[in-house]
Image: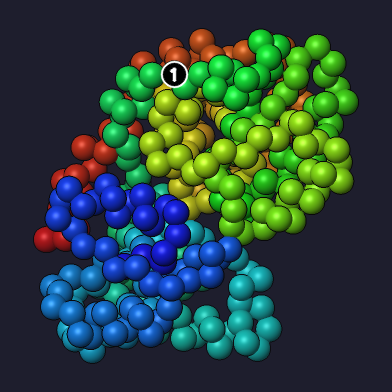
Amino acid sequence: MAPNYDGSVLLAQELERLNIKTVFTKTNKSFPSLSFSAVFKEIITGRYDVVHSHGFSSGIYASVPAKLKKLRHVMTAHDIFNEAQFSGYKGLINKFIISILFQFIDKIHCVSDDARDNLIRFFPKLKNIVTIPHGIEIKQFLDADVRDFREELKLGADVFIIGFLGRYMAPKGFKYLIDAMNKVCKLNATTNPIVICFGEDGGFLNRDRDRIRKLNLQDNFIFVPFEKNPASSLKGLDVVVMPSLWEAFGLLAIETMVAGTPIIASNCIGLRCVLKDTPAIKIPVKDSEYLASMIVKEMNDSSKNIFKKWSNENALKYDVSRKIKLYTDLYE
């Protein structure tokens, strides 16, 4: 089951060859999400042996119908909780309800140690947690052809290409990249920095576009369609910027580094686990000033050779095939 939006449609097309059925649900295009009623109806009326929900909302929605039908239920947590979500009287009630519903779930799969610690911090009574870090198809990212953005988008030879591949939601920190670019354009006069943004709608993008116009940065941001296979695109970028406020894991960081492309990323919860012992250029959370200085530094002295060397030596440990037995054991 998935909300009907671009990412889900592309995923469904990939899964068709495996004879996997996708049930689409109506959704708000800006904030795609499932509805409790749709999930409840599908689980109650369908014939399933296991429910695997992805994300807190999906897990909460599926917990009651799965319990009623006595189905095994695994939830993969793709986010973290913060204090603001449980502030005030209403927040305490929500926390109490969630704590009960989470205990209905047979196994909660966390994708990093940070994500596990965060869950235990808010729900210390949970005993049904297992941690399996993400993996990727490394061959796809090692062997992909380089996408030539300079030719494709008719950019000049003096352009420095920055990539942003996150959703246009507050946790991804896009606003801090916009502010950083305002500073970069003032600090640097020899090279033309361009940010290529993947995905043309959703979340707070309209607000972000307004800020780009207000700062007169329209020529420094290019929006291209959502990319279902990002390996070639990652190889065509000079640097990827990931200014997240928090992550459960930070899969993009691994994909970028295995592709051999430099990354500037915030040292936030979840993402810091991924960046440890890598050449990633780490920045403080919400620090557009420092982000700007690191972009300029990368423009003046590229670290691409360092990242290519690291990729060749370390890619294997992120191979998803190494995780398959762990997932199989979880299902068993």
Q: Position of residue 136 (x, y in %)?
A: 32, 37
**As drawn, 117 above or below 86:** above
Residue linked to disc 1: 146
What's the residue at 45%, 15% (across, down)?
308
Quadrant in which the N terminus appears = bottom left
Q: Position of residue 177 (x, y in %)?
A: 71, 39
Query: In the image, is 309 to the left or to the right of 320?
Result: right
What's the residue at 63%, 23% (across, down)?
161
**As drawn, 163 above or below 286:** above
Q: Position of residue 289 (x, y in %)?
A: 81, 35
What's the residue at 33%, 33% (across, down)?
318
Query: In the image, is 118 to the left or to the right of 213?
Result: left
In the figure, residue 9 lies in which quadrant?
bottom left
Instruction: Using the rendered image of the protein, determine whether residue 119 is visible from the camera's viewpoint.
Output: yes
**As drawn, 81 above or below 187:** below
Q: Nearer the viewer, residue 173 or 164?
A: 164
Instruction: Using the rendered image of the protein, determine whether residue 104 is visible from the camera's viewpoint.
Output: no
In the figure, residue 319 lies in which quadrant?
top left
**Dot 1 amino acid type:** Val
Quadrant in which the C terminus appears = bottom left
